[in-house]
Amino acid sequence: MRLSAVSIGAGAMIQFVPNLALAEGVTRHLRRSNGEAPSPFSFVQLSDTHVGFNGPPDPLGTAAFERAVKVINALDPQPDFVLFTGDLTHDAEDVAEHAKRFKTFRDISSRLRVKTLHHVPGEHDAALDGGTLFRENFGETHYSFDHRGVHFVAIDNVSQGRPRVGKEQLAWMQKDLARYSKSTPIVVFTHRPLFDLKPEWEWFTSDGDDAMKLLAPFDAVTVLYGHIHRENHASRGNAQHHASPSLIFANPDPSVAEKKPLPFDKDHPFNNLGAVEISSQKISGTEGVQQILKEVTL
Amino acid sequence: MALVIVINAKRFEFTPNQVTLTKGEPVTIKLVATDHAHGLLVKPLGIDLDANPDSPDEVTITPSQEGTFNAICDHYCGVGHGNMKMKFVVTAPAGK
């Protein structure tokens, strides 16, 4: 499996390409385990578009999002789908205004040539209304689907207000995952990190460990998330966690004391809104996903 | 009986915004939300509260380490949520 990025000059996009060169035995094993063998495809991850946000540190609003759409449309071959990992909109006290921001998000994303889009909410989308507007626009806040031998799980860790998956959703996860053999490649996509990246900046999920325990039996787990507005890669046990930068503004490295957005540079307006290339050398039922990360110069 | 410290939370501030505790002395931290649900999180001190306007939340702790600890509201409460912070300062017991 190969995760690679596309340089768009703006924003974060992760393209995910399973390796074609699977050993025949591995392919057979995976086909037996979930009924569908991995086959080549790619998808793109976009995150934190914050439609409706205007002002410092980024006065350009949806410019990076719109640019990303154009770049994705130029990809050849086209990705099979696009994942949005939350904070699609910036919240507004006025519900009608927030609804309008959802509509603007949909208007922009509808310009994508690829028509299969999957979304999870961020706290700016769903924390104030418990996910009502999100559901009206995109359906349930957590769900799963299979694509060419890979099982995708969308996790909502925002709509309860706090950084939490919650017992109900954990029970759903357990039931959902029980249908798959341990060799099935799993991709989780969510908004907040499922581990303690920096709790004092709210970069964590309080019961993320419980979610990861449910994923622990699987050979290969990839967790894609947003929220932190910067690239980050972490390996925890059987799981590789990858954060995508945002399409609005960038946050500093968590090693610094103060969480202060990086300054806007009008001459380089998409600075720090990077892309990342993630390439996997192999995928197998027993060895998991071996990923090599490569930054892309924009 | 532990000392009780009440912290009032409203968008987007805690009152008081700094509290001094004494290492080794039990204290009850009570969070009262007055306008919206708010959280109070200080992981190193074992404080993880979630209060609604009709249901305060509290925890009794015994600080075991000195220092200054940043606290945040971790229940998203609106666009100023990210600035809703306070500090806990834990000092050595008197005479030590």
Image: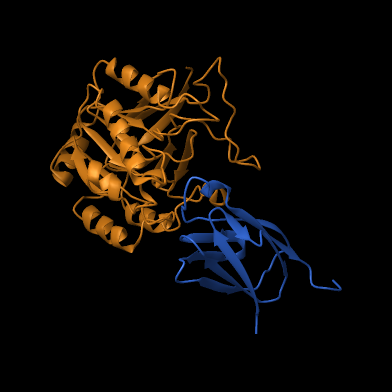
Residue A46, given in percent of the width and then of the height, sits at 36, 31
Q: Is residue A191 visible from the viewing direction of this image? A: no
Taking the spot 56% from the left edge, 25% from the top edge, the residue there is: A264
Q: Which quadrant of the view contains residue A19?
A: top left
Taking the spot 25% from the left edge, 22% from the top edge, the residue there is: A111
Q: Which quadrant of the view contains residue A101?
A: top left
Residue A80, given in percent of the width and then of the height, sits at 22, 27
Number of marks in the rendered image? 0
Which chain corresponds to the colour orange?
A: A
Query: Left or right: where does residue A115 sit relative to residue A9?
Result: left
Q: In which quarter of the image is the N terminus of chain B?
A: bottom right
Residue B34, given in percent of the width and then of the height, sits at 51, 64
| Foreground of the two, B44 or A183 | B44
| Foreground of the two, A183 or A178 | A178
The extreme bottom residue here reads: B1
Q: In which quarter of the image is the C terminus of chain B?
A: bottom right
For chain B, the rendered hue is: blue
The image shows residue A21, relative to residue A202, as above or below, that is: above
Taking the spot 39% from the left edge, 52% from the top edge, the residue there is: A128
Residue A77, given in percent of the width and then of the height, sits at 24, 17
Q: Which quadrant of the view contains residue B70?
A: bottom right
The colour scheme of the drawn protein is by chain
The image shows residue A134, relative to residue A100, as above or below, that is: below
Taking the spot 56% from the left edge, 61% from the top edge, the residue there is: B9
The image shows residue A265, relative to residue A287, as above or below, that is: above
| Foreground of the two, A154 or A91 | A91
Q: Is residue A39 visible from the viewing direction of this image? A: yes
